[in-house]
Image (cartoon, rainbow, N blue to C red):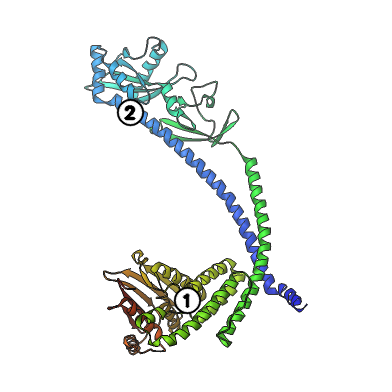
Amino acid sequence: MDHSHRDRTYKKSRFQQELEQSVSRKLISSLLLGCLLFCIAIAVVNALNQNARREDHLESVASTFHEVYNNTSAFLLDAGHTELFLSELRNDQDNLRYLISHYNVSALVEIQLILTDSKGNVRFTTFSEGEMNLHRQEFNGIAVDNACHLMRAVYTTVYHFRANSSEYVMIHPLYRDGEYQGAAAVYLNENDWTKLFSQYQYDAILTKSNGDVITCSNSSFLSQKNANKYLPADAAQYVRVNGNRYLRSSRSLENGTVLAYSFIYSPTNYSYLFVGLLLIVLLGLSWAAMFVRIMHAMTEQMVKSVDTLVREIRIIRKEDPDHIIEIDTGDEIDEIAHQVNKMVRSIQELSQRNIALAEVNNRMEMQNLQAQINPHFIYNTLDNIRYLIPTDPQRAQQLIGRFIGILRYSINNTKHNVPVKDDLKYLQDYLVIQSTRFGANFSYEIDIDDACMEFIIPKLLLQPLLENSIKYGFQKKPRIHIRVRGWLGEDALYFTVEDNGGGVDETMLEQLRDILRSDEVNIEHNGLQNINRRIWLGYGGDSGLTIDSTEGEGFTVKLKLRLGGM
């Protein structure tokens, strides 16, 4: 009964209620925001995709037109061809038929030629007698007059003889010594235009600026009353043709003389969009309700577990350093407790072993000079986690993961030497936790070359140096910055740990250097001494640790590890 009463009181505590409300509000708002962003993303992606298709299609149509136009213009303006045209006008030798046939072999759009003299008489044509009717002759004469009047190198127009039939016409006036001799007019085959544009997924229309249709891939887009004209009634993006909805866009070509229209089939799917949106919202609300219940249970258990763990840690810290934590919650806190117990046992074992290892050889000394994590770091980290749970559960979860990784890594006695990249992962987790603890008062940077990552170094080599920088740096300054560097030299691997803390004066600096050179154990500064001896035992030669400091400006530790050691 007493346990039940305490449980009911705990569940109704103000802290628990506020935590559940905070988590619930954040979870629901996050899920709803996620649904909204998802819907917006679908709309944006669809719009971007449609815009990309439109631009790709217009670009393809424009590219095809320019290629045909430029090839035909080059044919008309070629100096050798112009000379043949003039020669034909003088001699009537019918030398052009081969030239036209040869051009049409590789042309995207085949051409037919009409050559007229200065009086408008047809002197040569590749059209058959039936195709060269009176209507075409009259049109050609008017078009040639316009070309001469406008004084253009290449004049363009469109010839229509019947509905749904059009030929793009390009005319080049011919001059000799400044005197008009005649004109060469080429008619581009309408069927070839259609074949060119049928290769694209979407429909297209090419017109002159006055609406005369050059080619149309789908005749249903044209008016039955005037099938040779296309002049949009408005600038609407979406148009309906025979009950189908299309996205229409246009582009100006050849200095505004030609317009290219693109039509992309774009059916309306409002009903499907509405159903999809409704489904997403309902799913989001269902997930929110489900996760709220789960989070209520998780936060309740986590709060209990963290409080219990903190109490146990306080016992270890203040009352009994050998106390064993007993928590059976089955969650991350249980794992932390397990790792802390292993840490305590590991520290006890290492303490006992260090007494016996005083007289062993250098190799045994090297294997057992193992850096340990400050117990205060564990307590402070757990305290930070406890305060993050009600305000930022996700960050607390991430911090727990990093903390577990640190504990596992530091107490793993199966590996005494590890690649640089493994120790770097540990250092990053350690610095993130310290950054969470000190906030804006603590910053750091890590700059270790990729070439160093696979080299083997003693595990936890740099962590004690970082801990010293934090410990002594904050004693003299409210804010500190730590920089860790690593690079590969010709014969050694180098690391530096620099901080901008208070540093030490020249007298203290010389004392520390004497301690590094001494074989006697210095209790107060044995951390630097152990690291120096650890490096020297493992790498030999001039390997070791050097220090430098300027009072009021900072402290720098440099490590040299000769290649070929360990």
Viewer-side residue, 301 vs 262: 301
Q: Residue at x 35, y 83 (%)?
A: 361
Residue 491: x and y, percent?
Answer: 27, 71
Outermost residue toward the right in this view:
1
As drawn, 396 above or below 162? below
Type of the residue with mark 2:
Asn
Q: CA distance from mark 2 to mark 1?
A: 70 Å
**Is the N terminus in the top left, top right, bottom left or bottom right quadrant?**
bottom right
Sequence order check: which comes first, mark 2 or mark 1?
2
**Is the C terminus in the top left, top right, bottom left or bottom right quadrant?**
bottom left
* Crowd band around label 1 with a 10 angstrom C-alpha radius: few (<14), some (14–19), many (20+): few
Horizontal side of residue 437 vs 129, given as left or right = right
Element type where label 2 sits in the image: helix
Q: Residue at x 53, y 46 (%)?
A: 45
**What residue does disc 2 label?**
71
Horizontal side of residue 57 vs 154, given as left or right = right
Residue 515: x and y, percent?
Answer: 34, 88
**What residue does disc 1 label?**
441
